[in-house]
Image (spheres, rainbow, N blue to C red):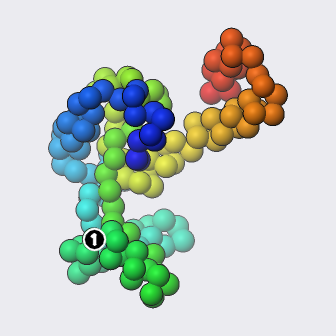
Amino acid sequence: MPILKENKHLYPKDWNEIAKRKKENVNWRCENCQIKHGIVGTRDEKMNFREEPEMEHLSIENLKTINAWLNTRYMKVILTVAHLDHDPTNNEDWNLKALCQLCHNRHDRKHRNLTMHLNKYRQQHKLFPQYEQQIFSKLQ
């Protein structure tokens, strides 16, 4: 998934090379569902992917335009690299997994929800900084 601006400093300078090497090692396929990077298609209500090879030459911007005109949901599969422990400073190979957008979002869902709730709690209660990590680690 895209690296948030506020987290960019946590990634190593050679992150792009690390991520590319990981994707190459798995032949540019999602390690969970085996879908191939760069293919274009749609997902049904059960999230099964239907490939549309005749649209693969289109850019993401063109797909967005077509989707707006035709009220469709064409998408290009983009392979990303996830940190299994959600720590962007831990770039050990065992901690990295090449995932499509759907699988990466599924992997991140619980952590993202916990972070969102913790941030909301922080704002509401001005949680003492020395206890934040202790509380957050218990939520995981």
Which is more toward the observer, 12 or 1? 12
Q: Mark 1 points at which residue?
A: 59
Q: Considering the image in quadrants, where does the C terminus appear?
A: top right
User: Where residue 69 sits: x, y (%)?
Assistant: 45, 87
What residue is drawn where x is 35% and y is 75%?
63
Q: Is residue 113 visible?
A: yes
The quadrant holding residue 87 is: top left
User: Where residue 31 sits: x, y (%)?
Assistant: 32, 45
Q: Is residue 22 visible?
A: no
Q: Which residue lies furthest to the right in this view?
A: 125
- Answer above or below: position of 65 versus 102: below
Q: Which residue lies furthest to the top in this view?
A: 130
* Left or right: where 121 falls relative to 104: right
- Answer above or below: position of 35 versus 46: above
* Left or right: where 57 falls relative to 120: left
What residue is drawn where x is 31% and y is 23%?
92
Which is more toward the observer, 65 or 117? 65
* Left or right: where 105 falls relative to 83: right
What residue is drawn where x is 24% and y is 38%?
16
User: Where residue 120 sits: x, y (%)?
Assistant: 73, 37
Q: Residue furthest bottom?
A: 70
Task: Determine the secondary structure under disc 1.
Answer: loop
**Disc 1 marks which amino acid?**
Ser
- Answer above or below: position of 22 versus 103: above
What residue is drawn where x is 54% and y is 71%?
45
